[in-house]
């Protein structure tokens, strides 16, 4: 079981401390190509209000989510509240120009300025470089005049307290994590019940004193809703082999009368390498449900059976048709 309101862990070598659960907000930007459904503004605003009222105290977004709609909707609620609630940690990410793919220093500045304007704040506690693998020129992005170097300048200027890397392919992330003094990183869809592709990356991060935020423990939703209700896996239609694997976990959960979502969530939260688990939500009711799953008493026998189910070490997004909306 996890106490969401009391536990706080410091992010890297920064002054920022976060709880074990973070709410992700990509779906709140209305991204039907990714999730298979739409989220209108009022539903998104209700969800953001519930996040700010929850004990988790931690929210993550990005400039690119829903072409800026995620941050704009979060910003509306921040203005309603008269500012970010005291002690609440707000995280976002700088992004490439989605039209041109440019991700140099000037684009990094534009991205941050757009984020601060949309959110209605003058700085953010956590700021990360987002998806450099999709930039038109990766080498430029990580070079001396690129977005990565500019990110560290932003920290020096006091625009953020902690800087990090949030990306997909772990073989691309590992050299950057080895060479740059990040405070934090986000890996997504690569450390969950069905796949542990991110383990080498996580081990390196821990060795270097870099905090790990593990996002998407539900593989885009199927490990929360079940294969019959939501047969999509990492934002794609799930194949038969994947659904067979998920059914094994569903069977374990059924026999022990525990929610699949609770097991998927706590698989991440109970790992000592994970500082915080980022759960995407798209409706207000999911906030309370996620908190309940985080605190669900799961018998040790469940974890023993889960450990015997084979998992993949391949990149689960290797064949994904990526769309930023």
Image (tube, grey):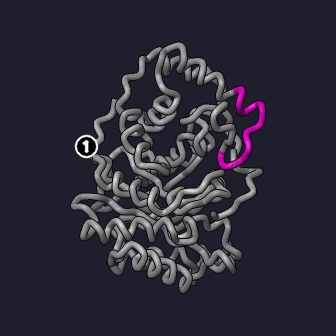
Q: Residue at x 56, y 82 (%)?
A: 107
Q: Residue at x 61, y 38 (%)?
A: 222
Residue 168 drawn in magenta: no
How packed is label 1: few (under 14 Cα within 10 Å), some, or many (20 or more)? few
In this image, 287 relative to 107: left or right?
A: left
Q: Is residue 10 visible?
A: no
Q: Is residue 102 visible?
A: yes
Q: With respect to residue 259, does 252 lie above or below?
A: above
- Element at label 1: loop
Q: With respect to residue 250, does 141 lie above or below?
A: below
- In what quadrant of the picture does the N terminus appear? top left
In this image, 67 relative to 164: left or right?
A: right
Q: Residue at x 50, y 58 (%)?
A: 28
Residue named by callout 1: 5
Which span is picked out in magenta?
234-244
Q: Residue at x 67, y 72 (%)?
A: 135
Q: Picture coordinates of residue 109 (x, y %)?
A: 49, 82
In this image, 175 relative to 281: left or right?
A: right
Quarter of image, res 96: bottom right
Q: Picture coordinates of residue 286 (x, y %)?
A: 43, 43
Q: Picture coordinates of residue 168 (x, y %)?
A: 62, 56
Q: Picture coordinates of residue 130 (x, y %)?
A: 55, 66
Q: With respect to residue 149, does 252 lie above or below?
A: above
- In what quadrant of the picture does the C terminus appear? bottom right
């Amino acid at each position: 079981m996890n106490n969401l309101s009391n536990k706080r862990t410091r992010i890297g070598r920064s002054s920022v401390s976060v709880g074990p659960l973070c709410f992700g907000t990509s779906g709140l930007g209305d991204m039907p190509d990714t999730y298979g459904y739409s989220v209108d503004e009022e539903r998104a605003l209700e969800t953001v209000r519930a996040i700010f009222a929850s004990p988790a105290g931690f929210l993550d977004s990005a400039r690119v989510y829903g072409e800026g709609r995620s941050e704009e909707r979060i910003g509306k609620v921040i203005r309603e509240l008269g500012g970010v609630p005291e002690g609440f940690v707000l995280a976002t990410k700088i992004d490439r120009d989605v039209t041109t793919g440019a991700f140099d220093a000037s684009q990094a500045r534009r991205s941050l300025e757009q984020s601060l304007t949309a959110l209605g704040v003058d700085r953010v506690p956590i700021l990360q470089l987002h998806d450099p693998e999709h930039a038109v020129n990766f080498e430029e992005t990580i070079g001396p005049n690129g977005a990565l170097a500019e990110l560290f300048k932003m920290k020096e200027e006091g625009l953020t307290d902690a800087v990090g890397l949030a990306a997909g392919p772990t073989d691309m992330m590992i050299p950057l994590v080895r060479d740059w003094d990040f405070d934090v990183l986000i890996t997504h869809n690569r450390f969950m019940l069905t796949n542990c592709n991110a383990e080498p990356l996580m081990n390196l991060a821990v060795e270097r004193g870099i905090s790990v935020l593990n996002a998407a423990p539900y593989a885009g939703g199927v490990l929360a809703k079940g294969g019959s209700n939501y047969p999509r896996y990492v934002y794609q239609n799930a194949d038969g082999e994947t659904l067979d694997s998920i059914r094994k976990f569903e069977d374990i959960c059924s026999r022990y009368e525990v929610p699949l979502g609770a097991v998927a969530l706590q698989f991440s939260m109970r790992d000592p390498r994970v500082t915080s688990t980022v759960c995407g939500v798209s409706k207000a009711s999911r906030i309370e449900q996620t908190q309940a799953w985080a605190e669900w008493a799961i018998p040790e026998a469940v974890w023993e059976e889960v450990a015997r189910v084979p998992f993949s070490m391949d990149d689960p997004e290797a064949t994904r048709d990526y769309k930023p909306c």
